[in-house]
Amino acid sequence: MNAATPPQRPPADYGDPVVLRTDPAGARDVPLKHPRKLLFPGEGIARADLAAYYLEVAPVLLPYLHERPCSFTRWPDGIAGRSFFQKNPIAGLPPWVPTRPFGNVNHMRVEEPATLAYLVAAGVIEVHMALGTWPDPGHPDIAVIDLDPTPPAGWDAVQRTGRMVKRALDVLGVEGFPKTSGATGLHVFIALDRSLPAGGVRDAVRNLMRTLQRVAPAEVTLEYRVSRRRGVFLDYGQNARGRTMAAPYSVRPRPGAPVSTPITWDELAHVTPADFTVRTVPARLGRLGDPMAEIFRVRGIRATRLDPATTKKPDMPAQTSGGGRGI
DNA sequence: GGGGCCT
DNA sequence: AGGCCCCAACGCCAC
DNA sequence: GTGGCG
Ligand SMILES: [Mn+2]
Ligand SMILES: [Mn+2]
């Protein structure tokens, strides 16, 4: 994420500066100095378009970010230019953006639409989130099953593996919520009760992934070395302490302006990650709403429920709805 | 994209 | 005034 | 302890 290919810098018309009034009172005005600067040259998507996207999806995106440590990738000159991670507050941060520490980092909190607009103005394209929330981000409320295809394995292998994951979760009586990563893979979110530290969550997911690997050794892998990987990598390490991942509805800095998009299990066999972009996702939300929103209402499980070694036994109450998690 | 720091 | 630097780290894993 | 990994 660091190549310095000179972005189209020429007589390009970046447009005249504008101010986005993101609240009626004018207390959250966000200036865009170069609203027509092309961030995704191939698609003609400019900074103002990206800001409009994030403001449109804010009602479904902000609930995921609530009280959660977030980090960002910034591409001030678009996806053809330089990039870097941002965890600590951006220099010159508006006073109305709150911050809160987790570990050695003082994270910017994303709690209102104006913050999304400000971040885009500052060059942010991608929004990443931790899997736990304050006051104790070290005890995650979300587990993720992260499916990363190793070329030449691709989306079709991910689709088949996702179906295996769904079957395994059904057997356990656990509900999983899939989303495209926006790049090549799939993320399945599972609501937790926060009773285990990140390491315990990782261990439970690892053991579930090991059983999948035993069932389909030709399709999936747990091999740590990229050079020796074949098939779909079951990346349980994504649950380790301090890790973050692309949030639902985050844009990805790749050609096509893809979006990490929640889908239903029924859709999995019929969609491809490129279907979901800055241009298409707002309309999809208007049609269908957020297929993952139910995660805010199901009761979180203890992560050990995912571990076949500790769950194999008799009474295994299915996950019930209700008793929301109040996120 | 922009603040800090150096020249 | 202009130019360069900086914007993240850390836990986990196999060796 | 080191280097690869995401
Ligand atoms: Mn992934
Ligand atoms: Mn991964």
Image (tube, coloured by chain):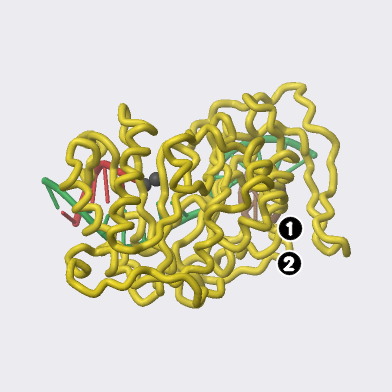
Chain colours: A yellow, B brown, C green, D red
Which mark lies nearer to you, 1 or 2? 1
- Dividing the picture into quadrants, the one containing residue A159 is top left
Dot 1: within a 10 Å radius of its alpha carbon, few (fewer than 14), some, or many (20 or more) residues? many
Residue at 37% x, 71% y: name it: A301
Image vertical order of residue A125 relative to residue A92, above or below = above
Give how far across and how far down residue A258 sits, in percent: 56, 37
Residue at 47% x, 70% y: name it: A321
Left or right, B7 with respect to A305, comes to right
Residue at 77% x, 38% y: name it: A34
Camera sees residue A243:
no
Q: Which residue is mark 1?
A: A114
Amino acid at the residue labelled 2: Trp
Give how far across and how far down residue A152 sits, in percent: 31, 27
The image quadrant where one finds ligand 1 is top left
Does label 1 or label 2 sit earlier along the sequence?
A: 2
Residue A96: mark: 2
- Dividing the picture into quadrants, the one containing residue A90 is bottom right
Q: What distance separates the C-alpha of mark 1 from that of mark 2?
A: 9 Å
Query: Are discs 1 and 2 less than 8 Å apart at CB?
Result: yes
Amino acid at the residue labelled 1: Ala
Numbered disc 1: what chain?
A
Secondary structure type for disc 2? loop
- Dividing the picture into quadrants, the one containing residue A300 is bottom left
Which is nearer the eye, A131 or A14? A131
Give how far across and how far down residue A92 sits, in percent: 70, 58
Which is nearer the eye, A17 or C13? C13
Locate the C terminus of chain A by quadrant: bottom right
Left or right, A124 with respect to A162, comes to right
Which is nearer the eye, A205 or B4? A205
Whether labels 1 and 2 belong to a single chain: the reply is yes
